[in-house]
Image (spheres, helix red, strand yellow):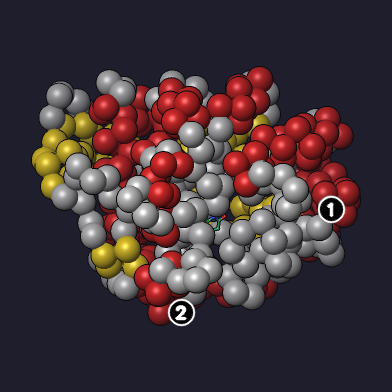
Amino acid sequence: MSDNDTLTLRRPDDWHVHLRDGDMLRAVLPYTARQFARAIVMPNLASPVTTASEAGEYRRRILDALPDDELCRGFLPLMTCYLTDNTDADELERGFVDGVFTAAKLYPANATTNSAAGVTDIANLDAALERMAGIGMPLLMHGEVTDPSVDVFDRETQFIKLVLDPMLGRFPGLKAVLEHITTMQAVSYVRSKQGALGATITAHHLMINRNALFEGGLRPHNYCLPIAKRESHRLALREAATSGEPWFFLGTDSAPHEIAAKEADCGCAGIFTAPAALELYAQVFDEEGAMDKLESFASVNGPTFYGLEVNEATVTLVRDAWDGPVESVGVKCFAPSGGLDWRIK
Ligand code: DOR
Ligand code: ZN
């Protein structure tokens, strides 16, 4: 159902989220579980999730932390394996076949939060990638090179050129997702693959450009990785997300850090969007005159790419202006300065 002021869509899923662990997990999980039926859970805990048994235990901690209300009870965390130089292809396959792992995540070593144990050279993953291609296990990528001589704003485009393109050439059957894309080059590259490669797009990269990091002073809460790029890239991302094309889908990359860890000499990368995630996307789609495309981006393209059923339940958004969330659980929430026009009913 849809008119200018209401939109009912299939319940969405979040194809990229950081739920953390312990107290932070208990604090942030309800936001994601209330809005989304399923979520791909990132494995970059302080001690990374590298085995099926660790992922199974982490999944149990997530399920145990779910609030006991009707919306949250059915939330399904989809677990991922953190790839390292020593990932064992048999372990990956076991975890995937047993239904513990939905996908595996590539963090180039030292690219971002808790990535020190990540992959130092993509060649170290040859056996794992070959196996994943054979069994249809998706590879999710933090797509940035880490060479300190490469400008921080060019790290995604260099990753596509130097790592991703050669890798897809070597493993043509591999199902891969370039996570949280931030550039027009990523948009065109994903399009050029016509379905072999998916991409998630965050709400914040649809809303801010790199000026937001320096608006009247340093703005640590707008710092994330990959870092926001210039305006022309933001516009390309908005065009891609609202295009309805099946390879673009919702992934918030909601990444909570305590305020003190952001407002620090060396502030952490991450933007916390979970409290109003769907409302943020709705704002963008409405501004682009594309509310009719929100359901495919948020609720259909992701499951179709992963080979999963779409959700049968629905959610209704209503036009209702509010300021957006400010701070919750000791974490600053991302919200546009003009507030939000949509609410979940
Ligand atoms: O901004 C980010 N925060 N980017 C990432 O890749 C990781 C994430 C986090 O875990 O905080
Ligand atoms: Zn992330």
Q: Is residue 237 shown to the viewer in this render?
A: no
| Amino acid, disc 1 | Asp
Query: In the image, which is nearer the foreground, mark 2 or mark 1?
Result: 1
Rendered position, 18 above or below 303? below
Q: Kindly identify which residue carries mark 1.
A: 121
Q: Which residue is mark 2?
A: 22
**Along the polypeptide, which appears first: circle 2 or circle 1?**
2
For label 2, being within 8 Å of ligand 1 is answered no
Q: Residues within 10 Å of mark 2 (few under 14, many from 20)?
A: few
Q: Is residue 204 left or right of residue 94?
A: left
Give the image location of residue 342, x and y in percent. 19, 40
Residue at 81% over, 58% down: 120
Residue lying at 37% horizontally and 54% vertically, measured from the top left: 217
Q: Position of residue 39 (x, y in %)?
A: 47, 53
Q: Quadrant of the N terminus?
A: top left
**Residue shown at 79% from the left, 37% from the top:** 162
Q: Mark 1 CB in 8 Å range of ligand 1?
A: no
- Gap in Å between the C-alphas at discs 2 and 1? 32 Å
Q: What residue occupies the far front of the structure in this picture?
A: 216
Q: Amino acid at mark 2?
A: Gly
Residue 238 or residue 133, whichever sits in front: 238
Q: Residues within 10 Å of mark 1 (few under 14, many from 20)?
A: few
Note whether residue 259 is visible. yes
Residue located 46% across and 42% down the image:
210
- Relative to 322, 147 lies left or right: right
Residue 55, image x and y in percent? Answer: 62, 68
Helix, strand or loop at label 2? It is helix
Location of residue 95 (image quadrant): bottom right
As drawn, is 42 to the left or to the right of 216?
A: right
